[in-house]
Amino acid sequence: MQELTKEEALTALALHKATLLQHSEECVMCALSEQRDRDLVVQGARVGTVVLDRFGSRAGHLLVIAPRHVERATELSFEEYASLQRLVYDACRALERLLQPKRVFVAALGASSPRPMTFSHFHLHVVPVLEDDERARPAQIFSWTEGVVTYEPEQARDLVRQLKSAWPVEGASPQEHQARNACSCVRST
């Protein structure tokens, strides 16, 4: 894992976007929802896709992406929206189990027009916060001012494998899941 400056991350993001979209003008989030970058997929389902953010603000930063291109939450049916929120909840549980953060922030972000570091396709950020100082403020978490976390391919695959293992079993309570899947947790530093 390495940390890039905002300028370095913007350059890397442009290269990744060109590779992911094969130089077309498609939506990056649509491509991720279609699981074109399989190494980053933590959970893929008809109701949405959870991916490790290749350019996250913190280690373990996840994106929960709507399965079809919509730009507003209200363009989803309530059932679709609720299904995405279930994926967010499960992502929080997996991150808490694996990384033991002090807090997990959840936010629906995205610009109304194309920007280099955000996309209009409706998605939710699920960000583990390990710090409890000024770096833990939402204004710091949801910006690239403090740098951007990226992963070497094997690091990303390994973290995705760990997150899949920590993913809650459907229908199990947090306590049942913890007892059934007892393991030594990894804490990112």
Image (cartoon, grey):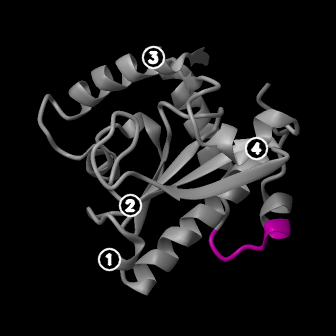
In magenta, the rendered stretch is 170-176
Q: Compare marks 2 and 4 and give the one earlier in the sequence.
A: 2
Q: Compare marks 1 and 2 and give the one earlier in the sequence.
A: 1
State the residue at coordinates (63%, 44%).
163
Asked if the residue at tag 2 contacts the one at tag 1, i.e. Cβ–Cβ closer than 8 Å, the answer is yes
Q: Compare marks 4 and 3 and give the one earlier in the sequence.
A: 3
Which residue is disc 4 drawn over? 137
Which residue is disc 3 drawn over? 7
Asked if the residue at tag 4 contacts the one at tag 1, i.e. Cβ–Cβ closer than 8 Å, the answer is no
Q: Give the distance between the C-alpha atoms of the residues marked 1 and 2, in whole angstroms.
A: 9 Å
Element under disc 2: loop
Camera-side residue of 13 and 176:
13
Where residue 150 appears, as percent x and y from the top left, is: 53, 23
The C terminus is located in which quarter? top right
Q: Is residue 182 left or right of residue 47?
A: right
Q: Compare marks 1 and 4 and give the one earlier in the sequence.
A: 1
Element under disc 3: helix
Q: Is residue 180 left or right of residue 147?
A: right
Element under disc 1: helix
Q: Please, is residue 93 above or below residue 188 in the view?
A: below
Where residue 71 appears, as percent x and y from the top left, is: 32, 64
Q: Hey, what amino acid is under mark 2?
A: Phe
Q: Give the distance between the C-alpha atoms of the residues marked 1 and 4, in whole angstroms.
A: 30 Å
Which residue is disc 2 drawn over? 122
Q: Give the distance between the C-alpha atoms of the residues marked 3 and 2, in whole angstroms.
A: 25 Å
Q: Hey, what amino acid is under mark 1?
A: Glu
Which residue is disc 1 drawn over? 75
